[in-house]
């Protein structure tokens, strides 16, 4: 048994209208990966925020090396050797990579920030993570996956003895996940205690040493990892071992709703981020776009939504060409996008759940210059119920919700525009097994009602379970489209690895 680095005893946390944690006990062992799992809203992030000094417990205590401590801020937690990689990226977009890594812990010389030294140290940390990101690059110029690497580098820079990783692989490619696992193994060998939160259950089985399960704010199970399997984890999380991944509803594909012809997006550095992509989507059809990081899936969706004025090619909705490159026009013609990065692009965190839901469809609830509050409130309540959004009051800030419930708000906002075609970029990123099943059932129901759904994912199990057809992208190009009945995992993986120098066996992980 490893020594206990940190212990939480009898901790509860109350928020207005909800009890997020209920008398929770949690031990974190040195030189080990301490896995914490639970559905969205189970209390995982609340528990981690208490350990990291972001939130204060309503009752209970925290012990570091057997001594009770009061973690009143992240600075106090850091002084006790506790660092955290947050699920939602906590970066300054207008600052450089190096400035973000050393924010609030700047390296100084003669009373001034030593930018050169910070950049050298940042480059060393990024090399340790096997990335060649320029430390002088503004963070806002990086894709989400690269930003996640910067967030991890920021935590490594603190030399923490207890390192919390909240969904660290949610935006990483298969190759980047392997790198992270090597770094974790190195940290374990140095005696660092890792607290690891993820919804990828097979991933947890692979790297975990101890596992603790939360359900509705209570600890429901604690074991060494060698004693458990995936069905045990799911049973502790949701009370049954049924994964209910995406049971398909029978539906027919109707007329062509959407067509993209020869879509191109040139790169500033030369070549194409989206390279002459053409595909179609029928009413009631779900088409999955599968590919590794950098395949061009997100960029293709951005072109379809009119977010790149310099993109070329033509979009058709119900046979009508849509030529204007602006998002409002595309929404008006029946397109809606659920973006990959819900925090930056899908939500306004300081607004309420209700305001976020109706943000893109306010014209439906206005009369002259006034919002019809009764109609808006009725619609909000209907979508909260339909999508099983866990919130005590729609007036609460959306930032108070768990990650999975925030994702459901983003989906609800898109659906309230009354789209014909729904674009979903990594719809299950950061979503637990229960919320994932909810989202997938919603997708199937919408398709059965005649909506066309085009979704991008790097999860092979998802694309195989949900898609009527599978479009594989690599390096900005559409490599191949499979009918679901003809698709095999091996064929899809091989197509996605084309041009990446990735072996199919490696791409499978």
Image: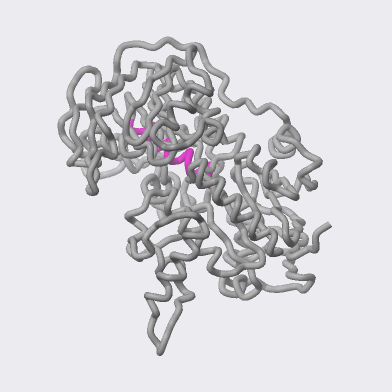
Image location (x, y in percent) of residue 329: 21, 34
In the rendered image, residue 460, in percent from the top left (x then y), is placed at 52, 29
To which quarter of the image does residue 358 belong?
Answer: top left
Q: Nearer the viewer, residue 346 or 5?
A: 5
Q: Quadrant of the C terminus?
A: top right
Q: Which residue: 55% across, 64% down?
A: 156
- The rendered magenta stretch, by its main secondary structure, is classed as helix
What's the image's color scheme? one colour
The quarter of the image holding the N terminus is: bottom right
x and y percent of residue 265 in the render?
23, 38
Q: Is residue 407 magenta?
A: yes
Foreground residue among 294 and 411: 294
| Range of magenta residues | 403-417
| Residue at 74% in and 62% down | 30
What residue occupies the far bottom of the structure in this picture? 110
Instruction: Judge from the rendering whether residue 103 lies leftward or rightward of residue 77; answer left or right.
Output: left
Task: Decide if residue 135 is on the left or right side of residue 186.
Answer: left
Q: Residue furthest right?
A: 1
Left or right of 230: which side holds 309?
left
Query: Image height check: is 67 above or below 39?
Result: below
Q: Where residue 67 appears, x then y in whole percent?
A: 77, 74
Residue 392 shows up from this direction:
no
Q: Is residue 315 magenta?
A: no
Q: Report the residue that reaches farthest toward the left.
A: 323
Q: Nearer the viewer, residue 54 or 480?
A: 480
- In the displayed structure, would residue 389 be above or below residue 420? below
Mark yes or no: residue 291 visible. yes
Residue in the image at 71% along x and 53% along y: 34
Please give the count of numbered marks on the rendered protein: 0
């Amino acid at each position: 048994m490893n020594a206990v680095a940190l212990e939480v005893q009898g901790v509860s946390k109350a928020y207005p209208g909800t009890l997020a944690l209920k008398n929770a006990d949690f031990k974190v062992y040195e030189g080990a990966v301490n896995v914490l799992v639970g559905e969205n809203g189970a209390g995982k992030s609340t528990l981690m925020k208490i350990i990291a000094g972001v939130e204060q417990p309503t009752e209970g205590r925290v012990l570091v090396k057997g001594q009770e401590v009061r973690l009143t801020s992240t600075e106090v937690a850091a002084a006790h050797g506790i660092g955290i990689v947050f699920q939602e990226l906590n970066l300054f977009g207008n600052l450089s990579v190096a400035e973000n890594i050393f924010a609030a812990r700047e390296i100084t010389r003669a009373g001034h920030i030593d930018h050169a030294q910070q950049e050298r140290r940042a480059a060393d940390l990024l090399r340790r993570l096997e990335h060649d990101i320029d430390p002088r690059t503004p963070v806002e110029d990086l894709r989400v996956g690269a930003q996640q690497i910067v967030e991890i580098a920021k935590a490594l820079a603190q030399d923490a003895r207890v390192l919390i990783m909240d969904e660290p692989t949610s935006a990483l490619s298969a190759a980047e996940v392997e790198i992270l696992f090597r770094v974790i193994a190195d940290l374990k060998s140095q005696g660092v205690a890792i607290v690891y939160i993820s919804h990828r259950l097979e991933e947890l089985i692979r790297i975990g040493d101890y596992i603790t399960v939360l359900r509705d704010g209570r600890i429901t199970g604690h074991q060494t990892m060698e004693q458990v399997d995936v069905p045990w984890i799911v049973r502790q999380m949701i009370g049954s071992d049924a994964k209910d991944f995406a049971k398909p509803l029978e539906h027919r594909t109707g007329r062509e709703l959407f067509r993209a012809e020869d879509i191109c997006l040139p790169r500033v550095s030369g070549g194409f981020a989206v390279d002459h992509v053409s595909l179609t989507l029928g009413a009631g059809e779900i088409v999955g776009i599968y590919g590794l990081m950098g395949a061009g899936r997100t960029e293709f969706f951005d072109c379809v939504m009119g977010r790149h004025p310099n993109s070329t090619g033509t979009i058709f909705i119900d046979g009508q060409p849509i030529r204007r490159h602006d998002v409002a026009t595309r929404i008006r013609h029946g397109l809606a996008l659920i973006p990959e990065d819900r925090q930056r692009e899908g939500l306004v965190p300081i607004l309420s759940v209700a305001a976020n839901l109706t943000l893109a469809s306010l014209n439906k609830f206005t009369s002259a210059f006034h919002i019809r509050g009764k109609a808006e409130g009725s619609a909000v309540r209907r979508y909260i119920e339909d999508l099983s959004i866990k919130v005590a009051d729609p007036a609460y800030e959306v930032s108070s919700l768990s990650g999975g419930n925030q994702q459901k708000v983003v989906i609800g906002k898109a659906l309230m525009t009354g789209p014909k075609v729904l674009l979903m970029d990594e719809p299950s990123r950061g979503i637990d097994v229960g919320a994932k099943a909810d989202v997938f059932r919603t997708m199937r129901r919408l398709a059965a009602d005649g909506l066309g759904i085009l979704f991008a994912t790097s999860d092979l199990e998802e694309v195989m379970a949900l898609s009527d057809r599978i479009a594989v992208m690599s390096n900005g190009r559409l490599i191949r489209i499979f009918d679901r009945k003809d698709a095999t995992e091996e064929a899809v993986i091989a197509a996605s690895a084309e041009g990446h120098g990735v072996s199919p066996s490696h791409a499978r992980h």
